[in-house]
Image (cartoon, grey):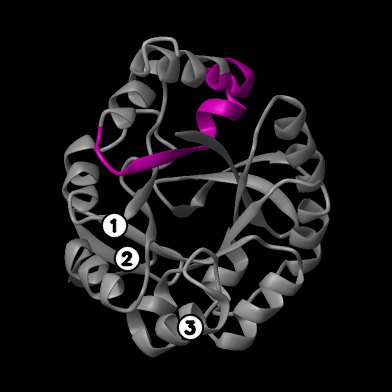
Amino acid sequence: MLVIPAIDLREGRCVRLFQGDFDQETSYSDDPAEVGRRWINAGARRLHVVDLDGARAGEPAQLEIVRRICELGIPVQLGGGLRQIDHVRAALDAGVDRVILGTAAIESPELMRESVEEFGSDRIVLGVDARGGFVALRGWEELSGVPAIEIIEDALKNGIERVVYTDIERDGTLTSPNFEETSRVAAIGPAIIASGGVARWDDLWHLSRIRNVEAAIVGRALYDGTIEISSASEWWLGQESVETGGA
């Protein structure tokens, strides 16, 4: 199970939002690539990048910054504003390892199916941003009324094997993840990357006990220093040693 640092981009800066609210923003750096380098030096093995401006605009808005982050040399997964096959192609051309389809996958299942067929299920990920168990769209600003579980079940039929599941009400709050909802979506079968609310070691431990959860995206807890990547990596290796009896 990986701990994946989040880098959220807005107007060229690295920021964090509270519960997805664009009016409750904390800015951490004017140089997102340098932030990525910091996490890599601390031991990160993958980065999670979100183009917040793209999510609102419906098209990629910061691919040059994304390209610079990709040039740092570790896998990068990107979400936000990728709603056409050309957007997916442009993101992959910029060096992104995985593309996360959220609003587009929900509104246009055919785009998700086409993307999986052209680029492979290892490179196309479903992004489900949920509030109260229902999917939110367009940068979390619209609630669809569609249950998250229903979207995931449909995506599996279209070849999706991995889901980034974000509980918006917990995102940026440092209150702990929504373990119950995460368990419900993980039980459907895909590999789950959990996001939203991770604040302390206990949160990571509880997520690691949920079947099919393979990673946790961590944002504010890393930026505020309550969790450190280097310690997280050592901790997970220790957990693996315990699980295997030290073998």
Regarding residue 227, the answer to whether it shows in the image is no
SS type, badge 1: strand
Residue 199 magenta-drawn?
no
- From the top left corner, tell me how far across and down residue 140 is, in percent: 39, 63
Query: Which portion, as a residue range, is magenta?
Result: 210-233
Q: Are marks 1 and 3 in contact (CB under 8 Å)?
A: no
Q: How many marks?
A: 3
Q: Nearer the viewer, residue 234 or 246?
A: 246
- From the top left corner, tell me how far across and down residue 90 is, in percent: 70, 78
Identify the residue under disc 3: 117
Q: Residues within 10 Å of mark 3 (few under 14, many from 20)?
A: few
Three-letter amino acid code at the position of disc 3? Glu
Identified at 55% across, 73% down, the residue is 81
Identified at 60% across, 71% down, the residue is 54
Left or right of 21, for residue 181: left
Work out whether 242 lies above or below 17.
Answer: above
Identified at 35% across, 59% down, the residue is 129
Three-letter amino acid code at the position of disc 1? Ala
Three-letter amino acid code at the position of disc 2? Ala
Identified at 83% across, 56% down, the residue is 68
Residues under labels 1 and 2: Cα distance? 6 Å
Identify the residue under disc 2: 136
Q: Are marks 1 and 2 in contact (CB under 8 Å)?
A: yes
Work out whether 184 lies above or below 124.
Answer: above
Residue 228 magenta-drawn?
yes
Q: Quadrant of residue 62?
A: bottom right
SS type, badge 3: helix
Left or right of 93, for residue 238: left
Q: Residues within 10 Å of mark 1 (few under 14, many from 20)?
A: many
- From the top left corner, tell me how far across and down residue 3 is, in percent: 51, 33
Q: Nearer the viewer, residue 27 or 147?
A: 147
